[in-house]
Image (tube, rainbow, N blue to C red):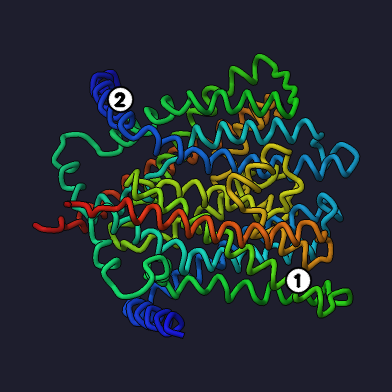
Amino acid sequence: MFAYYPIYRGYFRTSLMLMFQYRIAMLIWLLGGIIEPLMYLVIWRTVSLQQGGSVGSYSTNDFVVYFIAMMMVSHGTFTWIMWEYVYRIRMGQFSVMLLKPIHPIHSDIADNIGYKFLTLTVMGPTVLLLAWFFDASWQPAFWTLAAFVPVLILAFLMRFYWEWSLAMVAFWTLRIDAMNQAYIVVTLFFSGKLAPLTLFPEIVQRAADLLPFRWMLYFPVEVLLGRVTPRDLLIGLGAQLFWLLAGYLVMQLIYRAGIKRYAAFGA
Amino acid sequence: MFYIRLFATYLRIGILGELEYRANFWISLVQSALDLCVALGGLAVVFNHTDTLGGWRQEELLALVGVYFLIGGLIRTIIRPSMTKFMDDVRQGTLDFTLTKPADSQVLVSIQSIEIWRLVDVLIALPVLGIALLRLGARLGLLDTAVFAVTLLSGALIIYSFWLMLSTCAFWFVKVENIQVIFMSMWQAGRWPVSIYPAWLRAVLTFLVPVAFATTVPASAVSGRITDASLVGTVALAVAMLLVSRWFWRVGIRFYSGASA
C-alpha cells in the first residue's frame, strides 16, 4: 500500500504539469458538467414551485440542494477513460504503458484525481455561486457529513473500475462512440442524474436497485443531503463494497483477456 | 444555380465517402435513438408530476424536442464537420487549396464536409414534430405554418452565422476547436424552453450563444405563443448576423496569409 505513495506522487506531479498546459481546455470541458445538472435543477425547481412547493418527498429547496450536490458528486466521480482508451490503442501508446512495471490503471487514477483538484478552483466557486443564487439552505447532520467521505471515495473507486472495464472494449473494437453514449444514457436514468430516483415509476426504481449506478451518484448525494437513516447508510456502504469488488474482478478479467488480444500498431 | 450544383457535388462526395463506412449509419441511428430516449424520457418523468412546465404543455415541449433535433441534425450534418475541417485547414495551411478555387470561399468552406449519416437526427425529428403538430392540430392554420417555417429558417441561419464567426476567429487564434465544445454544451439546454431559466442564463442562451432563437422561438411559433415582436426580432437578427458574419469572414480572409508563408 505505502509502496504506491512515491509512485502516485510522481504521477500527480507530471499530470498536474501537463494539465496546466491545457488549462483553458480543462475549463471548457467543465462546462458540460455544470450545464447539465443546472438544467435539471431549473426544471425540477420550476415543477416544484408550480406544484405548490414540493414534489414527492422533495421540497423546492431540496431539489436545489439535490442537483447542486449531484453536480459535485458527479464531477467528483466522473472519468473520461472511455474516450481515451481508444486513442491509446489506436496510436499504440498502450505499448509504452505495458512496459512499465505497474498496472496502467494507477496512472489513470492519479490523472483523474489531479484533474479534480485542479478543477476544484472552478467547481468550488460555481457551487457556492449557485447555492447563493438559488438561496439553497442545507443543514447536514454531522454523522452523515462524516459518512459522506468514505461513501464518495467508494463511489469514485467503483465508478473508476467499472468505467475502466468498459473502456477496455476498445481492445476488441475501436467503434465505441455508440456504446459510450448508451452507457451515459443508462446512467442518466438509473443514477438519479435526471431526477431523484423516487420520482421515477416503480419499475425504473426496481431496475435501479439491481444496477450499480445508483450507488455511484444517487446514494452519495442522498448521504450528503442527510436523507438516509443509519440503516440505509450501512446497506449502501455494503452495496458499494460489493460493486467495487465486482468491478475490480471484472476489470482484472477483461484486462487479462484484453492484453492477450492487443497487438501494437506499427509493430 | 452554380452554387446549388456545387452543393449537390459536395453532397455526392459526402455520400460516396460515407458509403464506405456503412456501419456508421447504424451507429448514428443508435446514437440518435439514444438522444431521443433522453429527450422523451426527461419529458415523461417531468410530466408525470406536472401538467405544464413554465406554461408549456407536453405536446408543445414535444414540438420543441422536434425542433431541437431538426436544427441539431443540421449542425451535425453540415455546419460542425465543415467548420471543423476549416479550422484544420487554417492550422495546416491547406486552406490555400480552398481559396484558389473559382467560387466564393465562404460558401466552399461552409459546405465542404457533409456527414450524411447524421441526417438520421433530421429523420427522427420529422415524426416527432409531426406527432406534436398533430396533437396541437386544431389551432394550427396556414399562417402559423408559414411563421414556423420562417422562424426555423431564421434560427438555422443565426446558428450558422454564429458558428461561422466563431470559426473565423481561427485566422487569428488558430486553435479554437474548443469553442465548439462550449457551443455543444450550451446547446443541450435548448431542449427546454429558455423562459424557464433564470434571467442570467436566459441572457447567455439568447445573446451570448443564440440557442434560444434556434429552438425556443420556432417551437413557440408552432404552439401559437410567439409575439409579433419576437418574430420580427428573430428575422432581423438572422439577416443582421448573416451580414455581419459575411463581413467578418472577409476581414479574416484578408488577414490570412497561409501557414508557411
Check disc 2 and give the amino acid type.
Phe
Percent coordinates x, y for residue A68 in the rendering: 64, 32
When the figure is inspected, residue A162 is found, relative to residue B61, above or below; the finding is above
Disc 1 + disc 2, Cβ < 8 Å? no
When the figure is inspected, residue B77 is found, relative to residue A255, above or below; the finding is below
Few, some or many residues within 10 Å of mark 2 (<14, 14–19, 20+): many
The chain letter for the residue carrying disc 1 is B
User: Same chain for the residues at labels 1 and 2, yes or no?
Assistant: no
Check disc 1 and give the amino acid type.
Val
Q: How many marks?
A: 2
Percent coordinates x, y for residue A45 in the rendering: 77, 39
Give me the residue at 50% from left, 68% from top: B30
Who is closer to the viewer here, B90 or A161?
B90
Q: What is the CA distance from the residue labelled 1 to the residue labelled 2?
A: 57 Å
Give me the residue at 29% from left, 73% from top: B101
Q: Is residue A214 left or right of residue A243?
A: right
Residue placed furthest toward the top: A142
Q: Which residue is mark 1?
A: B147
The chain letter for the residue carrying disc 2 is A
Percent coordinates x, y for residue B143 in the rendering: 81, 76
Q: Which residue is mark 2?
A: A12
Who is closer to the viewer here, A168 or B215?
B215
When the figure is inspected, residue B66 is found, relative to residue A129, above or below; the finding is below
Few, some or many residues within 10 Å of mark 1 (<14, 14–19, 20+): some
Residue placed furthest toward the right: A52
Q: Is residue A7 left or right of residue B59?
A: left
Secondary element at image label 2: helix
Q: Is residue B25 left or right of residue A126?
A: left
Residue placed furthest toward the left: A267
